[in-house]
Image (tube, rainbow, N blue to C red):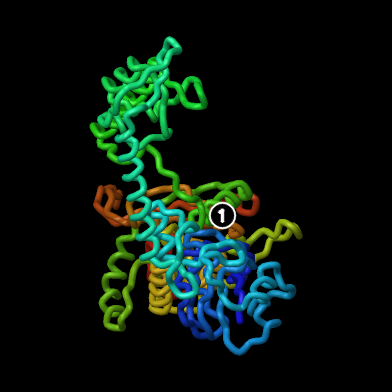
Amino acid sequence: MVREFKLPDVGEGVAEGELVSWLVEEGDAVSEDQPVAEVETDKAIVEIPSPVNGSVRELRAEEGEVVPVGNVIITFNVEGEDDEESATESAESEEPTESQEEVAEEPEVSEETETPEGRVFAAPSARRLARELGVDIATVDGTGPSGRVTEHDVRTAAESTTDEIEQEAEEVESDNDLEIQPENGGTSTVGPRPDTVEPADRDRTLAAPATRRLADEQGVNLNAVPATEERDGQAFVTPEAVQEYAEAQQQAQAADAAAVATGETGPREERIPYRGIRRTIGKQMQKSKFTAPHVTHHDSIDVTELVETRAELKEIAEERGIKLTYMPFVLKAIVAALKDHPYLNSALDEENEEIVVKNYYNIGIAVATDDGLMVPVLKDVDKKDMLQISSEMNELVEKARDRTITRGEMQGGTFTITNFGAIGGEYATPIINHPEVGILGLGELKKRPVVVDDEVEARYTLPISMSIDHRIIDGAVVASFANQLLEYLHNPRLLLLE
């Protein structure tokens, strides 16, 4: 019997997901809870498990396709289920759809290559090959089980198409009586011109002998030249049209040569689908920037003592199998300063017109990955020691970069930190992670000239850039917070009192 399976709701508020890859092919045997597909939604990739034991009947979505939650993405052949069960979706369907009624009536795959939905019964690999070879898979006869189209079938169809094209070209070359229409309106005939026969946009073009000679001189495929008029039901090309087409080709070739000369060897433009992580980031940034009026406070501090302290503790942490960076010090300092500036650890409930002050400290850490910016959240930072923070942070960052992080691990933040200094740069204007009201940006920690006792010395300094939601936070508050934060980083021993 047949079981349809819809794309489930893989997270709160998710309306659609991009099908990244199929982990099975049609005809494969599957067991319950076996991953069958990878779906990207918001900032995470999740595996979709099979709800049944059986075999894959049909894949209803293509890789790269954005599928709304609730759409059928795959069907299974399941033994031992009655007709009523086989016509419903595994967990969610309440009423049979039109396609389910058809499946219930035809429990076995027909010998035709078309399913009742009009889709071709073919493996994903065969579909990809058909696209690469320019073959219309709907015209391919399947020789696989139950009429399934295989890769071999696609290759055979591609070779057959090539043979037909070559045969047609030979027939055109052997035609000795091509009728042409001279410019004076009379008729005459010419012999074959194999040197001008190319794959054509038209089967046959009418043109005067002078026009054909001009096309030969300009190296133009006459059949590709736009016709200016029609005679006797066939396209008629004038010398002016040939000349215009030749000039357009020359301009295009000149542009290509200029692009190569300047190092532009590829296309001048490329269109990339705006979806997945990049679209999620874009929507969040747009919402934040247009909702919260941003103000950014910049400052810097001498952190030479912090560098020395971290160097002393680094070896001890490594003995315990933990990589100690500067970030745990910064996180502890942030929490200590937030406790004295509670409105920076809040959110604005616009619907109820209330400021919600959080008495817990979940710090989001922006992580640059190959797929875009992700913000894993380190929960209850105030309740953890330096090594705990370091260990959990390193684990979250690694999970974000290899795309194994869950939605829950990126939710619930109360304040965010971003380290753009890791790739260079001192100051920026970080965008608040709405609905939070503050975000701290770290510049590059390095030696800079500092005045100490009226003498200029090379000291380690750390620039910061902090953006706040000016609806809730005043400039004096962020300045006070920054001063306290920088004092903790200037003298890290103060963190022992927290």
Q: Is residue 329 at all visible to an observer of this figure?
A: no
| Rendered view: 436 above or below 215 | below
Q: Is residue 106 left or right of residue 271?
A: right
Residue that protrudes farthest toward the right in the picture:
352
Q: Position of residue 130 (x, y in %)?
A: 41, 57
Q: Residue at x 43, y 33 (%)?
A: 202
Q: Is residue 320 at all visible to an observer of this figure?
A: yes
Q: Position of residue 74 (x, y in %)?
A: 56, 71
Q: Residue at x 34, y 60 (%)?
A: 303
The one of 315 and 308 positioned closer to us in this rendering: 315
Which quarter of the figure has residue 308?
A: bottom left
Residue that protrudes farthest toward the bottom in the picture:
80
The one of 229 and 261 positioned closer to us in this rendering: 229
The one of 422 and 286 positioned closer to us in this rendering: 286
Q: Is residue 9 left or right of residue 461?
A: right
The one of 382 and 193 positioned closer to us in this rendering: 193
On the image, numbered disc 1 is attached to which residue? 284
Q: Residue at x 45, y 48 (%)?
A: 272
Which quarter shows the N terminus? Answer: bottom right
Q: Position of residue 305 (x, y in %)?
A: 31, 64
* Residue neighbourhood size for the residue with mark 1, other residues' Cα within 10 Å, grouped as few (<14), some (14–19), many (≥20): some
| Count of numbered labels shown in the rendering | 1
Q: Position of residue 278 (x, y in %)?
A: 48, 54
Q: Residue at x 33, y 50 (%)?
A: 163
Q: Amino acid at mark 1?
A: Gln
| Rendered view: 456 above or below 92 | above
Label 1, secondary structure: give it.
helix
| Rendered view: 78 above or below 435 | below
